Image (spheres, grey):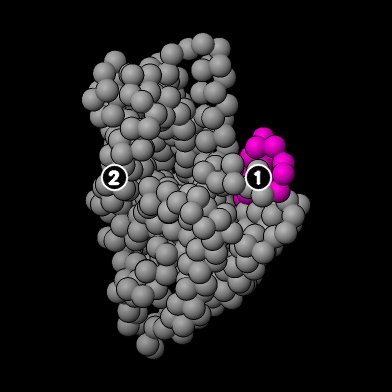
Amino acid sequence: MSDFSVEGMSAPCSTSVPPVGVPRLLSFAFVLGAFALGTSENVIAGVLPRLSEAFAVPVSDVGLLVTAYAGTAVIAGPVLALLTARMPLRRLTITAIVVYAAGTVLAVCAPTYPLLMAARIVTGALHTPVLVAFMLTALRLAPAEQRGRTVGRITLGLGVATVIGVPIGNALSETLGWQWTFALIAVLVGFTLLIVFAVFPDDRTPRGETGRRSLRVLTRRSVNGGVAMSALAGLGAMTLLTFAVPFLTNTGIREKTVAPLLLVYGAACLAGNVLGGRLADHGLSKALTMTLTGTGLALLVAGLISGSTVGAVAGLALVGLTYFSTFPPLNTWIATHADGVAPDLALAVNSSAFNIGIAAAGWLGGTTLTAGLSAAHLPYLGLGAVISAVVVSILLRSDREAPAARSQPPRLPEHDQPC
């Protein structure tokens, strides 16, 4: 049975009830959980010195904790999506959060570096399944005209984690010890679990195919195109955003004054996420082309005005605004166009492609800076990738394979429809 109804398909009951939206408490749990996972994923970079001192290992080795989390998420996400395709969403979500919480508690109590590494591998493995379960449930409950904004709230939690969660975690590490950083994340995950356990719907509707048949989703042109757009956009924008600090200090700003300026960038990212959700609800394919085109133009402008402090800050904020606006339409596109086959697998693969794009951006930017290229030229490095993503979005707008343009509000599970 399909999660998203398509025009011409009717519910088995004559009086189906359209979704009325995600309950506020459940929506809060999704945002809180995304905030906790986003903080956990990114906070290590800020506590590297404290962990190095605590475990008497080089900072370079501690940096592998970041690689372990991200690398495990890239590989484990699609694998677990295949293995758990038969699990009802409620059971899958609760199980994944419980295991994630256990991994986080292990990080708090880890007496040795290998155990902390094990904790990062466990949490990294469950990162994608939790977020995918959140998105699929939100899309099932949201009316068609609010899907983009609904997904946007979840990705907003990830954005807020970068802007607020990571600095708070770093401050806790400096004042109370690195364990308190993971303790905070454990508390947030615990609260998320309690709310999910209390209000998560017991929806046993099949999400699509299982086993080898679910791999058919990866043959859909629209799904492959969405995955490609995620990877290309990440590569293009993050070539600059990963190196925001050298981009700003290149104009003569002292490194100590960079942090307040990054708040401007962070606010722009959050605003972009909200904007992207609203654009997606007014036309999904148009939103993709608009936000990706905006990201390309923003990179071009950022390069042109990067010679001054005000220009660099404005350019960085503009790229953050436009790039983060791509998140809601991209995730909504993937889930909708994977309808009836394997939306969870498609979203997991998309997440992996997104992280691969970011990793490639880090390599590209780092390599060119090491070779002596000025940080002012970083925006131009990603232009080709973003332009390619725009081309893909334009080609897909005429693609009749996927049902997005013909979709109606998602059906409720049969047990929630009065017959």
Q: CA distance from mark 2 to mark 1?
A: 33 Å
Q: Of label 2 and label 1, which has the lower sequence position?
A: 1
Reading the image, the residue beneath label 1 is 53
Location of the C terminus by quadrant is: bottom left
Residue 218 seen by the camera? no
> Which of 347 and 223 lies nearest the eye of the viewer?
347
The image position of residue 335, as x and y in percent, is 46, 55
Magenta residues (range):
55-75
Q: Amino acid at mark 1?
A: Glu
Other-residue count near label 1 (Cα within 10 Å), few / some / many at <14 / 14–19 / ≥20: few
Say whether residue 62 is magenta: yes
Q: Secondary structure at mark 1?
A: helix
> Which of 180 and 225 lies nearest the eye of the viewer?
180
Q: Left of 316 or right of it: where is 104?
A: right
Say whether residue 183 is magenta: no
The image position of residue 44, as x and y in percent, is 56, 47
Other-residue count near label 2 (Cα within 10 Å), few / some / many at <14 / 14–19 / ≥20: some
